[in-house]
Amino acid sequence: MPTDTLQTVKVHPLIVRITHWVNAFAILLMVASGWRIYNASPLFDFKFPKDLTLGGWLAGALQWHFAAMWLLALNGLVYVVYGILAGHFRRKLLPISPGALLRDVGAALRGRLAHDDLRVYNAAQRAAYLGAIVLGVVLMLSGLVIWKPVQFHALGALMGDYEGARLLHFFAMAALVMFVVVHVLMVALVPRTLPTMFTGRARVRKA
Ligand code: HEM
């Protein structure tokens, strides 16, 4: 394509790029240490492979989990507060209509999902990103109940108390891990999105 038909545009603000990568790193630590904590007292009839876990033993894994928790909570808060106050969520993640969502998920499954203008997320992306944010909030709240069941008793009552919060925490983790697997797969299918999450810019066709 002749270069005079291209222009450089801003795709992701700096704060979104920084919080995205810090969140991704913190979530990796949370999941790997969380799997080690789960292995010490499994909810179900299986354990996670030891090589995929972090912390070595229960107390070590708990230390990792709590350290990464502060990183994720503070960094996640910066992302969410920025997203709401700066209108980033309203501009990039909304609106989502059920029709557009069905159309885009169908196109994605057939490998025909267009993502030509990197400044605009399609409906499948909007729903997935909003879903990941909601899962993050659910994980934080259910984690608080598991950590301090007495102090967060009222919150726990909404989740079926301690045991309910444990189940909710587990299934929200499983859903977030599924999101990450699909998310990374989609990035691999449209690799030109990856540099934009570092540089914040992309070259697009002039209007
Ligand atoms: C581990 C947990 C991860 C979570 C929770 C997550 C979540 C998100 C969210 C919410 C967005 C939208 C950001 C916004 O505009 O506000 C996003 C975008 C993006 N993420 Fe992730 N992400 C994760 C990991 C990764 C990884 C490992 C990669 C790289 C392989 C990646 C690559 C990207 C890219 C390239 C975009 C921009 C997509 C586009 O412009 O079409 N993410 N991610």
Image (tube, rainbow, N blue to C red):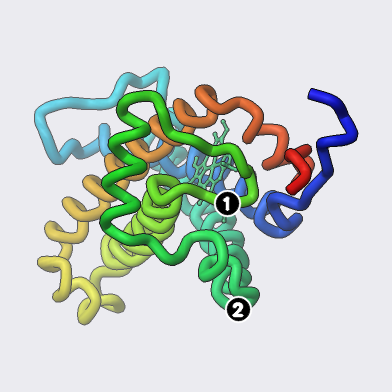
Q: Quadrant of ligand 1?
A: top right
Decide which of 40, 3 is in the foreground and name it: 3
Which image quadrant: the N terminus? top right
Marks 2,1: beta carbons within 8 A: no
Q: Nearer the viewer, mark 2 or mark 1?
A: 1
Q: Is residue 95 above or below residue 151?
A: above
Describe residue 138's horizontal placement relative to residue 65 as left or right: left
Decide which of 3, 199 is in the foreground and name it: 3
Decide which of 185, 117 is in the foreground and name it: 117
Residue reaching furthest to the right? 4
**Which residue: 53% across, 66% down?**
89
Give the CA distance from mark 2 to mark 1. Answer: 19 Å
Residue type indicated by callout 2: Leu
Describe residue 95's horizontal placement relative to residue 85 as left or right: left
Q: Position of residue 185 (x, y in %)?
A: 45, 26
**Which residue: 22% across, 26% down?**
47
Label 1 sits on a secondary structure element that is loop
Q: Position of residue 62 (x, y in %)?
A: 42, 46
Decide which of 54, 105 is in the foreground and name it: 105
Describe residue 194's horizontal placement relative to residue 55 as left or right: right
**Which residue: 28% across, 54% down?**
99
Q: Is residue 77 in sight in this rendering?
A: no
Mark 1 nearby-residue class (10 Å; few <14, some 14–19, many ≥20):
some
Q: Position of residue 15 (x, y in %)?
A: 71, 59
Residue 120 is marked as 1
Disc 2: which residue: 85
Q: Is residue 73 in sight in this rendering?
A: yes
Residue type indicated by callout 1: Val
Q: Position of residue 190 (x, y in %)?
A: 55, 27
Label 2 sits on a secondary structure element that is helix
Q: Is residue 52 above or below residue 44?
A: above
